[in-house]
């Protein structure tokens, strides 16, 4: 039965010929484990497509339904937590493996003639990977996703002359709302996958046409001394794929995917933090304040990717071993070190903030009771309704003590505009620090009704 079906399909589709072409394809003798990175990236993209289809079956791309549908997936759908966890962690793996694949090609100088277009498409696939991560980040519609996307889209508004129009196109208006969520969802599940399939197909075609670059030493690339993809390299690729899926299953089971409280667009006190793979950019922006923000947000990243695209035309010499290319080693090593160091600094600052928040989270019921009296006496309930649980002219205060340290809150009481430019909150610098601490303890007691 199965043999008849196979023969029927093979006669019409040429399955055996296609399989033989790929499995018996001769690789340079220098092909090793480093050459599994491209296959690993492709495997992870397939995992993302499969898990993404599953998630899309339950997801509601509206501000009212997005967060609830994601929570439903995690808590009610059979294996929903595992599937979403795999989707979340596979995105992180891709943000490591795709750059590593490009680095391998860079250090092997495999971008040179006749593989210039192969390299350029690889650079665009790196950008596509980052775009997948950025557009998918907003979809849970929780606090972290919302405010991190606000910061990310604000960077688009920095583009000279057309920045305002770009921002409105991306968001569907001035603020993030229903249109922005719909557009991010459409781009994430329709536009980017279509581009991905096209570019990967073209990438594989060019690799087939020009073969693998192999070693920088021509003597080690003679195909007459090479070996077929199957079984040696196929076994390596399958081993890497097995290790990846095992790691994804473990991380999805052990940690799942994060989901904070539903997004609150009026809570402008939330401190946004992007996912770890964008932390270096987040940290770099801190060194370009005010009018220099454009340099850190767009100029430096733009010049970097332009340099990557032009690299095959700037470096036209013969292929050499990495140690014979000191400038390339310096550039590549410097970029890796810079990104790693900026990420380290950002994580370090984040840990300090979390430690301060943990200290501030200690709760004293007596002080909270005294703080409630101060809250009413000073008219705070005029801006923060229902004892601070709801937003009027000011944001809801629920969770504020988890997001900010005690020192930050005290300074905010004294001079709100110094920490939140444009804030209309009244200064409470006439209160003593002891009274401010009582107010903070009252804020800790607030919960949603």
Image (tube, helix red, strand yellow):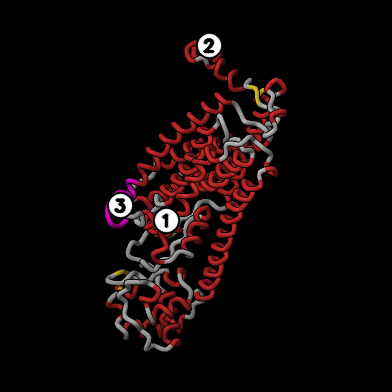
Number of other residues with Cα within 10 Å of mark 1, as a class: few under 14, some 14 to 19, many 20 or more: many
User: What residue did someone put label 2 on?
Assistant: 7
Q: Quadrant of the C terminus?
A: bottom left
Asked which secondary structure carries label 1, the reply is helix
Q: Residue at x 57, y 20 (%)?
A: 19
Label 3, label 1: how far apart the Cα atoms are: 25 Å
Front-lying residue, 122 or 186: 122
First reached walking from the N terminus: tag 1 or tag 2:
2
Asked which secondary structure carries label 2, the reply is helix
Q: Which mark is residue 162?
A: 3
Asked which secondary structure carries label 3, the reply is loop
Q: Residue at x 50, y 51 (%)?
A: 257
Report whether 108 appears left or right of 11: right
Number of other residues with Cα within 10 Å of mark 2, as a class: few under 14, some 14 to 19, many 20 or more: some
Of the two numbered discs 1 and 2 in the rendering, the one whose residue sits closer to the viewer: 1
Report whether 443 appears left or right of 284: left
Q: Position of residue 113 (x, y in %)?
A: 56, 31
User: What residue did someone put label 1 on?
Assistant: 145
Q: Is residue 169 magenta?
A: yes
Mark 3 and mark 1 in contact? Answer it, CB < 8 Å: no
Q: Residue at x 53, y 33 (%)?
A: 116
Front-lying residue, 446 or 308: 308
Label 1, label 2: how far apart the Cα atoms are: 50 Å
């Amino acid at each position: 039965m199965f043999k008849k079906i196979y023969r029927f399909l093979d006669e019409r589709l040429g399955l055996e010929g296609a399989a033989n072409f790929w499995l018996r394809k001769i690789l340079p003798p220098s092909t090793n484990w480093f050459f599994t990175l491209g296959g690993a990236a492709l495997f992870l993209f397939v995992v993302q497509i499969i898990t993404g289809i599953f998630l899309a079956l339950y997801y509601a791309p509206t501000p009212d339904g997005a967060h609830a549908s994601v929570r439903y997936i995690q808590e009610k759908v059979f294996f929903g937590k595992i599937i979403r966890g795999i989707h979340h962690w596979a995105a992180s793996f891709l943000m490591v493996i795709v750059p590593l694949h490009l680095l391998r090609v860079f250090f092997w100088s495999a971008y040179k003639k006749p593989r210039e277009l192969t390299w350029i498409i690889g650079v665009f696939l790196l950008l596509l990977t980052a775009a997948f991560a950025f557009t998918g980040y907003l979809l849970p519609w929780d606090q972290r996703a919302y405010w991190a996307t606000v910061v990310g889209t604000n960077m688009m508004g920095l583009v000279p002359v057309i920045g305002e129009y770009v921002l409105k196109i991306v968001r569907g208006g001035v603020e993030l709302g229903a249109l922005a969520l719909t557009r991010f969802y459409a781009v994430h599940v329709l536009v980017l996958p279509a581009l991905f399939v096209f570019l990967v197909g073209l990438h594989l075609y060019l690799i087939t046409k020009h073969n693998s670059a192999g070693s920088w030493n021509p003597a080690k690339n003679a195909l007459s001394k090479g070996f077929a993809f199957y079984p040696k390299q196929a076994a390596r690729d399958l081993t890497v794929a097995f290790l990846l899926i095992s790691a994804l299953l473990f991380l999805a089971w052990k940690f799942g995917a994060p989901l904070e409280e539903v997004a609150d667009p009026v809570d402008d006190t939330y401190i946004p933090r992007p996912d770890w793979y964008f932390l270096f950019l987040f940290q770099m922006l801190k060194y370009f304040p005010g009018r220099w923000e454009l340099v850190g947000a767009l100029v430096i990243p733009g010049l970097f990717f332009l340099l990557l695209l032009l690299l095959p035309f700037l470096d036209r010499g013969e292929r050499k071993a990495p140690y014979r290319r000191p400038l390339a080693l310096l550039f590549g090593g410097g970029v890796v070190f810079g990104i790693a160091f900026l990420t380290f600094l950002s994580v370090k600052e984040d840990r300090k903030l979390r430690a301060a928040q943990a200290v501030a989270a200690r709760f004293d019921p007596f002080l909270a009771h005294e703080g409630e009296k101060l809250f009413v006496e000073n008219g705070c309930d005029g801006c923060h309704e229902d004892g601070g649980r709801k937003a009027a002219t000011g944001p809801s205060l629920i969770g504020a003590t988890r997001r900010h340290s005690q020192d930050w809150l005290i300074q905010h009481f004294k001079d709100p505009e110094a920490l939140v430019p444009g804030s209309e909150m009244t200064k409470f610098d006439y209160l003593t620090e002891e009274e401010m601490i009582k107010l903070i303890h009252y804020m800790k007691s607030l919960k949603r009704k």
